[in-house]
Amino acid sequence: MSNVTIMNHPLIKHKISMLRNENTGTNEFRTLVEEIAMLMGYEALRDLPTEDVEIKTPIETCKSPMIAGKKMAVVPILRAGLGMVSGILALVPSAKVGHIGLYRDPETHEPHEYYCKLPDPIEQRTILVVDPMLATGGSGSEAVSFIKQHGGKNIKFMCIIAAPEGLERLQKDHPDIQIYVGQLDRCLNENAYICPGLGDAGDRIFGTK
Ligand code: PRP
Ligand code: URA
């Protein structure tokens, strides 16, 4: 599982437990998703390239590393992925934001695309695809395929909770991408919901039913 990183940090674990709680309301849920995305982003963006720039401190002039270029894109899978964008932009404010609209058919659980808009030049960017949930893996795998069709190359996928089934599918379909998982859960239920999971992430972020 060398292309998979499962987070192991008490702050992330604590916040995911709060997310799981059915009594956590919309406002708190949204804040937690943003905070977890930021904490996970710190790890997922560990290999962003830096370049030394000249800086004049109050004491002397030195060369000091800064993020090289402005070639990053964060791509949320609509809708629930939107909740993670602000956490990543807090870390990299210059990142461009693409969107991929997918919804899961409630009967077949197959993903259906309804929107795709990615920033140019996508092939030169580090692309961080975000979605809180990786259940069957259909949506995540389809989103990564769209990005590749549009020319995306350096792709990372970040989710807060994954089911083993979804993680296996994403790895099998896209062995070339890096995958970051907040917590790996037990299994899917008969409705392809993650157990124990947190319910429907999109509904809980946006207060819909
Ligand atoms: C949820 C979730 C993922 C997808 C995961 O979105 O945010 O995108 O399901 O399931 P999968 O791995 O089986 O494809 P949903 O389709 O419910 O849409 P929403 O974000 O608009 O709520
Ligand atoms: N989508 C969700 O929001 N939650 C799940 O458990 C599975 C898919």
Image: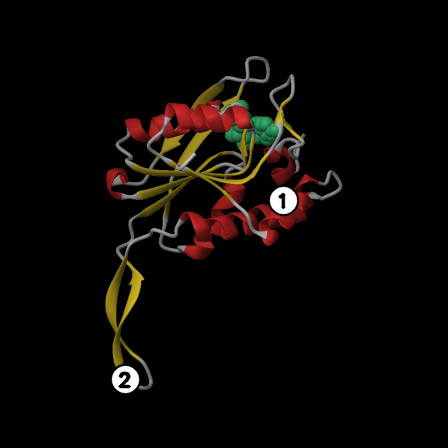
Q: Quadrant of the C terminus?
A: top right
Does residue 82 show up?
yes
Q: Position of residue 184 (x, y in %)?
A: 57, 35
Q: Classify residue 7 as left or right of residue 172.
A: right
Q: Secondary structure at mark 2?
A: loop
Q: Quadrant of the N terminus?
A: top left
Q: Classify residue 10 as left or right of residue 137.
A: right
Q: Residues within 10 Å of mark 2 (few under 14, many from 20)?
A: few
> Which quadrant would residue 175 be assigned to in this image?
top left
Mark 2 residue's CB less than 8 Å from ligand 1? no
> In front: 186, or 114?
186
Q: Classify residue 43 as left or right of residue 34.
A: left
Whether 196 is drawn above or below 89: the answer is above
Q: Residue at x 61, y 40 (%)?
A: 205
Residue extending farthest top: 108
Numbered circle sitting on residue 16 = 1
Q: Which amino acid, by three-letter code, is at mark 1?
A: Ile
| Ligand 1 position by quadrant | top right
Q: Residues within 10 Å of mark 1 (few under 14, many from 20)?
A: many
Total numbered labels: 2
Q: Residue at x 49, y 25 (%)?
A: 137
Q: Secondary structure at mark 1?
A: helix
Whether 156 is drawn above or below 209: the answer is below
Q: Position of residue 113 (x, y in %)?
A: 43, 23
Q: Position of residue 160 (x, y in %)?
A: 55, 40
Q: Which amino acid, by three-letter code, is at mark 2?
A: Glu
Residue denoted by label 2: 60
Question: Looking at the image, do the residues carrying marks 1 and 2 touch, with CB atoms under 8 Å apart?
Answer: no
Numbered circle sitting on residue 183 = none
